[in-house]
Image (cartoon, rainbow, N blue to C red):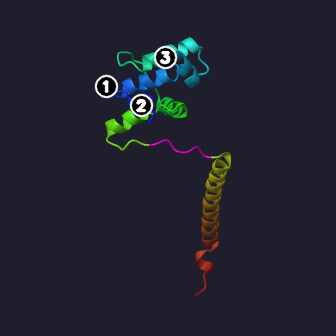
Amino acid sequence: MSTQDELFHEDWRDALVHLVKALGGYDAAGAELWPAKTRKAAGSWLYDCLHVDRPAKLDLEDLEALLRMGRDKGCHVAVHMLADSAGYERPQPAAPKSQRTVLLEQQAAHAEQIARLQREIDRLDNGTALRAVRKGDETN
């Protein structure tokens, strides 16, 4: 466990604020989340999102990105707080996958998709062949 994770946090939002600070602050983390915004605007938006008295909220994709950024930085406080508050065991970061492993997984997923498509084509072809037989053409 990282020493950054050993601090007490009042709630999930507090843990996210701690994570953002570990990532270099609101401006740095915000700029990483929303590169189309100016650094200052992104930081202000992130600040607003993490304070309960502000109407702005993070999207699920933004939360996921923050947790990934924390994992990459070695700061797991937010994901641990989420697990604690939801009644789960604290997860450990997964070992990074090699590019080859990622490509093999993608290849397997595509091969399965192709097999599903072929089964659907076969089903349609078989259904069409059965419909082509007219009632009067059947022989017993």
Residue under label 3: 45
Q: Is residue 125 above or below residue 41?
A: below
The tag on residue 5 is 2
Magenta segment, prevailing SS (helix, strand or loop): loop
Which is more toward the observer, 131 or 46?
Answer: 46
Residue 138 location, quadrant? bottom right
Circle nearer the N terminus (3, 1): 1
Q: Is residue 1 above or below residue 48?
A: below
> Which region is colored magenta?
92-97
Q: Secondary structure at mark 1?
A: loop
Name the amino acid, label 3.
Trp
Residue under label 1: 10
Name the amino acid, label 1.
Glu
Disc 2 vs disc 3: which is toward the camera? 2
The N terminus: image quadrant: top left
Q: Residues within 10 Å of mark 2 (few under 14, many from 20)?
A: some
Q: Is residue 93 magenta?
A: yes
